[in-house]
Image (spheres, grey):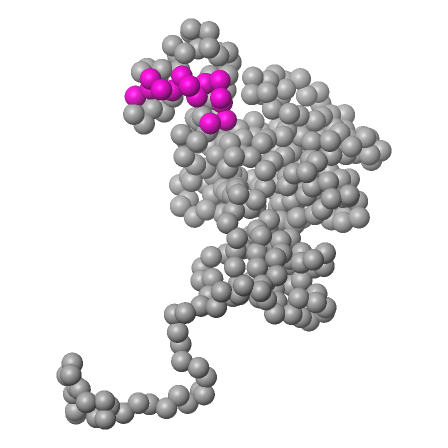
Amino acid sequence: MRRYGKHTDEDDIRSRPNRKGNRPRTHIRPKHEDAAEGMVLTVDRGRLTCLVDGRTVVAMKARELGRKAAVVGDQVALVGDLTGQKDTLARIVRIEERSSVLRRTADDDDPYERVVVANADQLAIVTALADPEPRPRLIDRCLVAAYDAGLTPLLVMTKSDLAPPDKLLELYGALDIPHVVTSREELESGGAADRVRAHLGGRVTAFVGHSGVGKTTLVNALVPEERRRTTGHVNAVTGRGRHTTTSALALPLAGDAGWVVDTPGVRSFGLAHIDPSRVILAFPDLEPGTEGCPRACSHDEPDCALDAWVADGHADPARLYSLRRLLATRERTEGD
């Protein structure tokens, strides 16, 4: 068998013909400078529905993107057939830089992050006041994820005809979170939707909540022309709803007033990916007090400088309690 050294005569080397007749592989990738801009509305089994120049276009991710996945809310660049006609398929060749990423994990020791939505600027946390009962730990976890992602939280309480909101409002009063209380009658009449809509203007708002809390019913009231099938059933034994929204979907509010992103109901909200140091950024009245904290302070230990900061009257003690409750939620399960 003939072996070739480093310094071979080119005439001695035989090149194999390309049987497939295609071009040789190259690491040079096209720039696609003429690609159209679009927004990902929903993702279903590798097919992404995007909004391009006012029409919906079905696309797939280009191989050159590798493992980088596009999610709902992403701004993307597309090439190929952009007519949006039946049985046509475009190609996503670039995912633009994201302004925010809302993430979660299945549980607190799961290293795999799931991106819920990209480029949102508000998180509407929907919870029922009864049927099913409120889960404050789940709300806390959603708040921590919102603060970590830089999103403004909005608390939406449904089914006030079954239970009063006073206890829940007292629990989150120190956080000064905008909130809306709704009832079933108000949702049917449209009054509740109008009050929620007042908080959505000009924003991309992701709606998250436990199954059965009425999240999709609320979204239907906000965007009636894009109605989604609702749950309507809560298990009498477990108090849990049945998932009917199986994929996230971005929906435009009338009059270009913003976007609503309906997400599947969650039963857990893992925070394995959360950096506790980012949560303090949501507490501007407490953040200056951390300058005297020891390195890698958890803000819930004897040497934490926040105790002296609050004792000197720079912030409300209730705010420090709320911060520590949120930070500690990573150490507790959501059913605690």
In this rendering, the answer to whether 61 lies above or below 254 is below
In this picture, residue 71 sits left or right of residue 251: left
Q: Residue at x 42, y 7 (%)?
A: 311
Q: How many marks?
A: 0
Q: Position of residue 41 (x, y in %)?
A: 64, 53
Image quadrant assignment for residue 331 = top left
Q: Residue at x 57, y 56 (%)?
A: 76
Q: Position of residue 55 (x, y in %)?
A: 72, 59
In this rendering, the answer to whether 322 lies above or below 124 is above
Q: Residue at x 63, y 30 (%)?
A: 154
In this picture, residue 148 sits left or right of residue 123: left
Q: Nearer the viewer, residue 83 or 328?
A: 83
Please state the extent of the stretch shown in magenta in the rendering. 281-294
Q: Nearer the viewer, residue 244 or 280?
A: 280
Residue 46 visible somewhere in the drawing? no
Q: Nearer the viewer, residue 232 or 58?
A: 58
Q: Position of residue 177 (x, y in %)?
A: 60, 24
Position of the N terminus by quadrant: bottom left
- The residue positioned farthest toward the top in the image shown: 312
Image quadrant assignment for residue 160 = top right
Q: Residue at x 73, y 48 (%)?
A: 228
- The residue positioned farthest toward the front in the image shown: 33
Q: Nearer the viewer, residue 136 or 25?
A: 25
Q: Position of residue 92 (x, y in %)?
A: 56, 62
Residue 7 visible somewhere in the drawing? yes
